[in-house]
Image: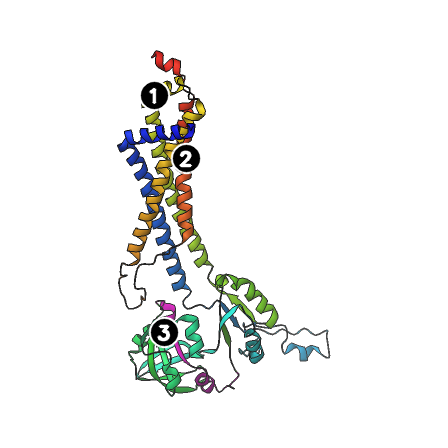
Amino acid sequence: MKASVNFMISSTQLLARKRQSIIAMLGVLFGIAMFIFMMSFMKGVNNYIQDTMLSAIPDIHIYNDIRTDYTTSVTGSWLHNDPQKMVIVHHPKPEKVRLNLKNADAILADLKTRPEIKVISPLLSTQVFFNYGSVQINGILDGVDILEESKIFGLHERMITGTPENLLTADKGVLLGQGLADKLNVAKGDLVTLATPEGTSMRFRVVGTFAFGLSTVDNIKAYVSLASVQQLLAKNHDYITDIRIKLHNIDAAKELAALFAKRYGYKSEDWESTNPSIKAGNMIRDSLTWVVCLTMLTVAGFGIYNIMNMVIASKMKDIAILKAQGFDGSDIRAIFLSQSLVIGVLGASLGLLLGFLLSYALSRVPFPKTEFTFMKYFPVVFDTRYYFAGAVFGILTTFLAGVLPARKAARVDPVTILRG
């Protein structure tokens, strides 16, 4: 009975000062709405930047790292019979190193049994010279299983002309990075000569161009079939230099890369070790977003605190009358805390709705179209965790903003107030 009376008094006071109540509620509403909006948008931006930076990087990359070994040299034959001799060799040359994975078939078979792996793409990578007329450009040629490679890097969405499947149907076809094609001044259907540093060469027909939006890839990269590179380099069908892996869970890359390096004896790099700046950048942007958004909610809380203080100052005689009629300090605290909570709950509810509407509206705004941008709309992430955090923090802020004014009201001495 007493609780219902307290709530009735609280609601009466809220309705009696509608302007102040609405202003306080709007502070919470816009604070939470901007929190939801900025968190959703910034997380979308982070995901877009990460996807762009990782678009040309596999989750795990296994390859034969070049190790120059100078521990043995021609000095061994000179010192064999007479260990007292001193032989000095200037600028020793390392022995010729084979870059291929020697037991590639066994490694691929073992990787295919791992449930954590989504896609495996073996490849043979080599440096080549792209020749078209008098133009000669140095670049990288990857011989791949184009279907598996496309699954890892999403080549279908990155094609400017042609399709990845054109490599399967064309005899000696090549997919060029758009920047590389522009430098060579070639288009789909033109013939390009590819020459290796060893002097072997072969002509390929351009069957498509692609763009990752990264000049370090688009200006130097080309794809052909794995068999074509093996033929160009005069290698066997089992000769490969790299294995690219895409995982179901990218967060497991670091642990699995270390396991593969130990298991197979080759260099195994995860995406995070290769590009630590990506994760650091995401962490910095996330931290900045949280700081800005929580600051807005805190400012809204201080606004409610000031309004509640002013309300109590203007209601001193009402408080004194309530105490004179038998209301104790806990009743007074409950009356004013309930006012803060009502403002907080209403403001939080409407703020969550407004935040969702703003986020959804931005997610339907077309992103400016460029040659190397494949995003249709502005990136926005709808994550329930942000809505939950916004609601909890908004209500908690308004509750704490009402605690001190409520305690002040509970300590009012009715005799002093009524005496004037």
Question: Looking at the image, is mark 3 or mark 1 earlier in the sequence?
Answer: 3
Circle 2 residues within 10 Å: few <14, some 14–19, many ≥20: many
> Which residue is found at the position 46% from the left and 62% from the top?
275
Real-space CA distance between mark 1 and mark 2, rounded to the nearest whole angstrom: 22 Å
- Quadrant that contains the N terminus: top left
On the image, the x and y values in percent for residue 176 come to 35, 77
On the image, the x and y values in percent for residue 128 come to 41, 79
- Residue 399 bears which disc, if any? 2
Relative vertical location of residue 294 with respect to residue 128 in this rendering, above or below: above
| Amino acid type of the residue that numbered disc 1 sits on in the rendered structure | Asp
Q: In this orientation, which residue lies closer to the viewer: 57 or 26? A: 26
Circle 1 residues within 10 Å: few <14, some 14–19, many ≥20: some
Which quadrant would residue 112 be assigned to in this image?
bottom right
Q: Is label 2 or label 3 in front?
A: 2
Residue 94 seen anywhere in this rendered image of the structure: no
> Which residue is found at the position 43% from the left and 59% from the top?
278
Mark 3 residue element: helix
- Residue sitting farthest toward the top: 419
- Residue 156 bears which disc, if any? 3
On the image, the x and y values in percent for residue 268 come to 54, 68
| Amino acid type of the residue that numbered disc 3 sits on in the rendered structure | His
- Report the residue marked by disc 1: 318
- Quadrant that contains the C terminus: top left
Q: Is residue 18 left or right of residue 309?
A: left
Mark 2 residue element: helix
